[in-house]
Amino acid sequence: MDDRIRMHDYSKEQLLLLIEDYVTINFQGMKYQTREAILNMICDAVNYYDIGKDLNWESIIAIREDLEDDLKEYVDEIISIHHN
């Protein structure tokens, strides 16, 4: 994932589909840096588009269990953004 995802190029609906695709494919099979970039993008998207209420939280929480501790912090931040 060398390209940065520019959120303004996507509609809210497209971004939600993109996030769902990322978290349901073999997330653990990705390189650490790729997982980190995706989680960072999701954090930004939740802030930028205010999509917290529209995310599939089961998918987000499911990937959290297998993440390294520092990457779990991204998921925790996504959750905290949604609940604020």
Image (cartoon, grey):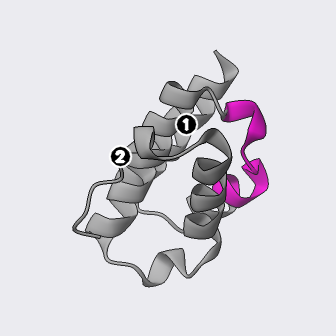
Residue 73 at least partly seen: no
**Quick one: 47 or 12, which is closer to the camera?**
12
Q: Residues within 10 Å of mark 1 (few under 14, many from 20)?
A: many
Q: Name which residue type carries label 1.
A: Ile
User: Distance between the Cα atoms at labels 1 and 2?
Assistant: 18 Å
The quarter holding residue 31 reads: bottom left
The quarter holding residue 38 reads: bottom left
Residue under pointer 2: 6
Q: Residue at x 63, y 40 (%)?
A: 12
Q: Name which residue type carries label 2.
A: Arg
**Is the magenta region chiefly helix, strand or loop?**
helix
Position of the C terminus, as image quadrant, is top right
Residue under pointer 1: 78
Report whether 59 appears left or right of 76: right
Q: Is residue 64 magenta?
A: no
Q: Is residue 60 magenta?
A: yes
Residue 62 in the image, given as x and y percentages of width and height: 69, 62
Image: magenta residue range: 52-61
Q: Residue at x 56, y 29 (%)?
A: 49
Q: Residue at x 72, y 45 (%)?
A: 55
Report whether 83 appears left or right of 32: right
Tag 2's secondary structure?
Answer: loop
